[in-house]
Image: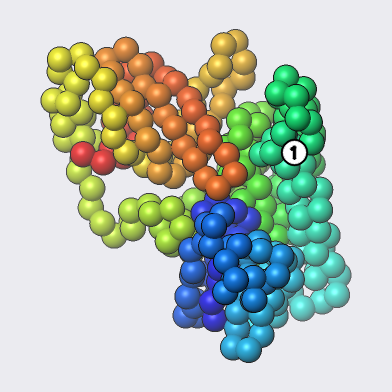
């Protein structure tokens, strides 16, 4: 079995379910250029990801792939407990995520496709963020008293996780949605989810021992002792918040980031195939996040 994906794309949901299955598979990393190459277009004329190849069977479209993987592993009950009602509930939320929530991000990722004027495109993206927030409210309400969207872990939860990562990455934010925030934390703690992120984004496997927080801070101080800014890579593994003006607190997306740090402040930059985000926090806050383990420095 082979999954074609791009980092940051919705194919992460399929990647997670493949990890949950515990069965061997191959993940093939693609980019904007390779998905338009003749070899790939012969497999998927649409020139998009995800694409699943299982023997002589090729399958595109997230909903179809997730359903297929769930049916291949019925013992995991990722499409419900086997009853028609339970499966319908999973498909209800999977359909909502795919047809409503996913599409709501498009004007944020690509506003220029809808309005060529830069000023109007920015306004469109801002309006789209409000629409996404409305959808997040429905999802947050659905998780009230539940750990999973339908009460048990399902393929819908894998897709849900991707949408919430997009919300964080595009500065829509999860502020005010305590159930969604708790869900993201549970998913990041999941071994299968982490394994998929290790493969897609180059996160450090949890078995690898990193330098201790005090040692990281000592090495950092050596780098900036002359009060000069330095650039390095880091991994956000816990909750790291920042604010823009007087706005609500936003969350730095977990995963690999590039940071430019001085004794005044720290600028985080992160990027996937859809979006590039940036955030600034005071150096004192940055040091605290390193101390409590929310940020791991590549030093």
Q: Which residue is mark 1?
A: 113
Drawn side of residue 101 relative to residue 217, left or right: right
Find residue 219 and report its image quarter. Answer: top left
Q: Quadrant of residue 15?
A: bottom right
Which SS class for mark 1?
Answer: helix
Residue in the foreground of this view, choosing between 1 and 240: 1
Residue drawn at x 77%, y 64% is 90
Q: Is residue 186 visible?
A: no
Residue found at x 70% / y 23% = 118
Residue 216 appears at what percent x and percent y? 21, 35
Q: Where in the figure is residue 12, as x and y percent of width and height? A: 57, 59
Q: Is residue 275 above or below residue 25?
A: above
State whether residue 112 is above or below residue 20.
Answer: above
167 over 8 or under it: above or below:
above
Location of the C terminus by quadrant is: top left
Whether residue 25 is visible to the viewer of this picture, yes or no, is yes
């Amino acid at each position: 079995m082979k999954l074609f994906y791009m980092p940051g794309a919705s194919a992460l949901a399929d990647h997670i379910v493949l990890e949950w299955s515990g069965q061997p598979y191959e993940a093939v990393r693609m980019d904007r250029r390779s998905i338009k190459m003749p070899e790939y277009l012969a497999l998927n004329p649409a020139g998009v990801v995800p694409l699943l190849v299982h023997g002589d069977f090729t399958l595109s479209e997230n909903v179809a792939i997730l359903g297929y993987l769930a049916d291949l592993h019925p013992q995991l009950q990722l499409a419900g407990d086997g009853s028609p009602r339970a499966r319908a509930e999973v498909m209800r939320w999977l359909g909502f995520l795919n047809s409503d929530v996913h599409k709501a991000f498009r004007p944020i990722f690509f506003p220029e496709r809808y309005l060529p004027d830069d000023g109007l495109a920015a306004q469109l993206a801002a309006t789209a963020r409000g629409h996404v927030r409305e959808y997040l409210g429905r999802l947050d309400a659905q998780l009230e008293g539940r750990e999973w969207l339908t009460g048990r872990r399902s393929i819908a939860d894998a897709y849900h996780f991707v949408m919430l990562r997009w919300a964080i990455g595009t500065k829509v934010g999860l502020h005010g949605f305590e159930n969604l925030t708790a869900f993201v934390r549970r998913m990041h703690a999941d071994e299968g989810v982490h394994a998929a992120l290790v493969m897609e984004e180059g996160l450090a496997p949890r078995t690898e021992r990193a330098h201790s927080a005090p040692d990281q801070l000592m090495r950092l101080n050596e780098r900036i002792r002359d009060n000069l800014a330095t650039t390095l890579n880091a991994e956000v593994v816990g909750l790291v918040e920042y604010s823009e003006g007087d706005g609500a607190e936003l969350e730095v997306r977990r995963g690999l980031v590039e940071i430019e740090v001085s004794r005044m402040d720290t600028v985080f930059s992160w990027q996937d195939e859809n979006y590039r985000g940036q955030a600034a926090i005071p150096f004192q806050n940055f040091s605290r996040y390193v101390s409590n383990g929310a940020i791991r420095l590549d030093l």
